[in-house]
Amino acid sequence: MELSVFLVVALALLVGGVVGSFVPMVPAGLLSIGGIAVYWWNTGYVTPGPLVFAGFVAVGLLVVVVDYLAGVIAAKVGGASTLSSLAGGLVGFALFFVLGPVGIVLGITATVFALELYRGNARNESLRAAVYALVGTLGSSVMQFVLTLSMLVAFLVLLVV
């Protein structure tokens, strides 16, 4: 294994994907796919092989899906309306720029709770929907971390083998 600029860029993108799994609005899965693609392109589309590359891309796309849908799906499972789920995500995103990661947590939870109360749900039903939305959002970060880390580890194993 020879250290080249392309290998360094690939590793930086893969590590960026892992770190980005906990940073809002950073496309962790796309960074990880980018790292693999840079290396694959540099090897003349030889390493990894096409099937392994497709596997990496599939895992990276799964990270993207988890990132964008886990919180909304969890909120729906908890009984929240689609509007409440989406509004919670938007408010959480906006508050991120004011309060950092706490803004996401506060924005999602408070918005879903308030909108579900406004829709006429009981307090405990509204709270349940808000907690589900929060757990889904936090759980998606953990899942993104596991998946992007697995891509990084698999890539390192690929380099050694």
Image: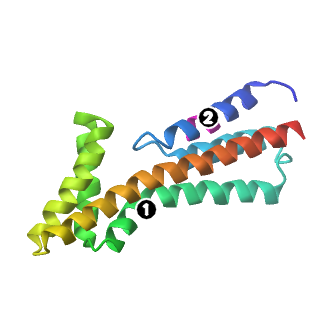
| Residue 62 drawn at (x, y percent) | 58, 60
* Left or right: residue 147 compared with residue 107: right
In terms of depth relative to the viewer, which is nearer, 144 or 28?
144
* Membership of 16 in magenta stretch: yes
* Membership of 35 in magenta stretch: no
- Against 116, residue 152 (above or below) is above
Report crowding for label 1: few under 14, some 14 to 19, many 20 or more residues within 10 A (C-alpha): many
Q: Which residue lies furthest to the front in this view?
A: 124
Q: For the stretch drawn in magenta, what is the main secondary structure?
A: helix
Quick one: quadrant of the N terminus?
Answer: top right
Element assignment for label 2: helix
Q: Residue furthest right?
A: 161
Three-letter amino acid code at disc 1?
Answer: Ala
- Against 148, residue 123 (above or below) is below
* Left or right: residue 97 compared with residue 114: right
In the picture of the structure, the residue carrying the numbered disc 2 is 15
Residue plotted at (84% across, 53% down): 49
Element assignment for label 1: helix
Quadrant of residue 47 within the rendered picture: top right
Residue plotted at (21% across, 61% down): 112
| Residue 34 drawn at (x, y percent) | 63, 43
Count of marks placed on residues = 2
Three-letter amino acid code at disc 2?
Answer: Val
Report crowding for label 2: few under 14, some 14 to 19, many 20 or more residues within 10 A (C-alpha): many
In the picture of the structure, the residue carrying the numbered disc 1 is 70
Residue plotted at (66% across, 60% down): 58
The stretch of residues the image draws in magenta is 13-17
- Against 121, residue 147 (above or below) is above
| Residue 25 drawn at (x, y percent) | 40, 44
* Left or right: residue 79 compared with residue 22: left
